[in-house]
Amino acid sequence: MRVRRGPGAAVAAALVLLLGACSEPSPDDRTPASEATPPTPTDDPPATPDTPVADPAHAVEPPGARDGRLWSADILVQWDQSIDDDLVEQIEKLKGVAHTERIGLGQVSLENRVLTVASVDPGAYRHFTQADVADFQEAWDRVAGGEMAIDQKVARRLADKDGMIRLGSEDDSPSLHVGAYTPQVPTIDMVVNTAWADDIEMSTDNGLLISTDDITPATIRKPLERLVGKDASVQMLDVASRLGLDPDAKLTAIPTGGTLGSVVGTFRYTVIGGGRIAPDPSWVAANIRTEVVPILGSVTCHKDLFPQLRAALLEVQQRNLSDKIHPEEYAGCYYPRFIANTTTLSNHSFGLALDLNTPGNGRGTVGEMDRDVVAIFKTWGFAWGGDWRWTDPMHFELSEVKAVG
């Protein structure tokens, strides 16, 4: 058996387990993600794991020891709704398709990074990961028990001192404990079990992983695209493992629940180079506007941002704080591009964030933003980047839709 693995296999050594989960976890009981002393997987994982269930309310049947061969993760197809059974059967009959696995896919906005979360059956999905990831038994037991598996670099940026990550900007957004650091299938940032899907407001079967085994994935791209239609995203993961994204794919972001999901809807785009993207013109026409607001003048943002932005800026004026915002230092709202040096979307891609007073409010600093202005923006449903673990005090983004007037 030969299973292809891209350059991502080199990071397999990053596999570590986060200890501290228990049957009834509390913040005081958990080992912080930053302080854990994690073991590494062994060559002979236990056949009968006894990993404690961290979250019984979001637990699924534990997968048991891995049984069966591994499959190469070659193509990822994403729809904006559940996959039709008949269509899956047709895909499986395509010459070159060796194996498929249904998963759920959605995007969450965490500190201005739009990240992809997959809801999976741990026992089946693990067969599409690298060999040492697939055999890391306790990691999959922890996913089954309600915890999250996530790339280590992503977790370090987002997990709090208790090893928790909140999937959303609202106060009632679900929070998950990081159970394991594991490299993920290309383009997927974090994995949860299917019991979390309702709480995260995402699907369990709008994505399809495809293995072509010994056939070059590109050879089935055109017949696959004809079969799934223009509204589906078809990504070649062998390309994504090298470049971060497949530049020939029509990509899809489906923000999960909450403010982002209700405002953005389905966001389709293509990569056009230089860190830029081209959103679907119909989405832009339906959602992006250029209007005049107090203090800043003419700005281009998502149409649903304007009522709250105007309300916040009007209150700034009424409280004689206008001089605390410098229009000449405004750095924009709608920017259809990736975060610099990444292939990660930001809320600027949707026109739902703005940067103010940029010179004195650089990333990683406390910043000079007037705190009364910050408080006003928070009152009107904006999150402030100065509150983040890796601060961005120039940045404000819509986190809650509020009625104005």
Image: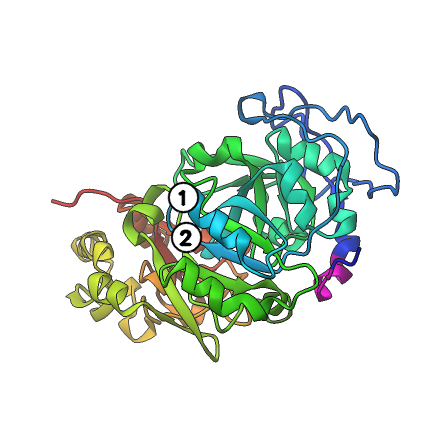
Give the quadrant of the N terminus. bottom right
Q: Nearer the viewer, residue 396 or 214?
A: 214
Residue linked to disc 2: 79
Q: Residue at x 37, y 46 (%)?
A: 81
SS for tag 1?
Answer: loop
Left or right: 253 in relation to 10: left
Q: Position of residue 352 (x, y in %)?
A: 32, 58
Check disc 1 and give the amino acid type. Answer: Ser
Give the quadrant of the C terminus. top left
Answer yes or no: is residue 106 visible: no
| Quadrant assignment, res 281 | bottom left
Check disc 2 and give the amino acid type. Answer: Trp
Q: Residue at x 53, y 44 (%)?
A: 102
Badges 1 and 2: C-beta atoms under 8 Å apart? Answer: yes
Q: Position of residue 264 (x, y in %)?
A: 31, 54
Tell me: residue 28, above or below residue 155. Answer: above
Residue linked to disc 1: 82
Tell me: residue 96, above or below residue 128. Answer: below
Mark 1 crowdedness (10 Å alpha carbons): few <14, some 14-19, many ≥20: some
Q: Residue at x 18, y 53 (%)?
A: 307
Rounded to the nearest angstrom, the CA distance separating label 1 from label 2 is 7 Å
Tell me: residue 67, above or below residue 57. Answer: below
Q: Position of residue 2 (x, y in %)?
A: 78, 59
Q: Residue at x 66, y 65 (%)?
A: 215
SS for tag 2?
Answer: loop
Name the residue furthest left: 405
Q: Which residues are magenta?
A: 4-11
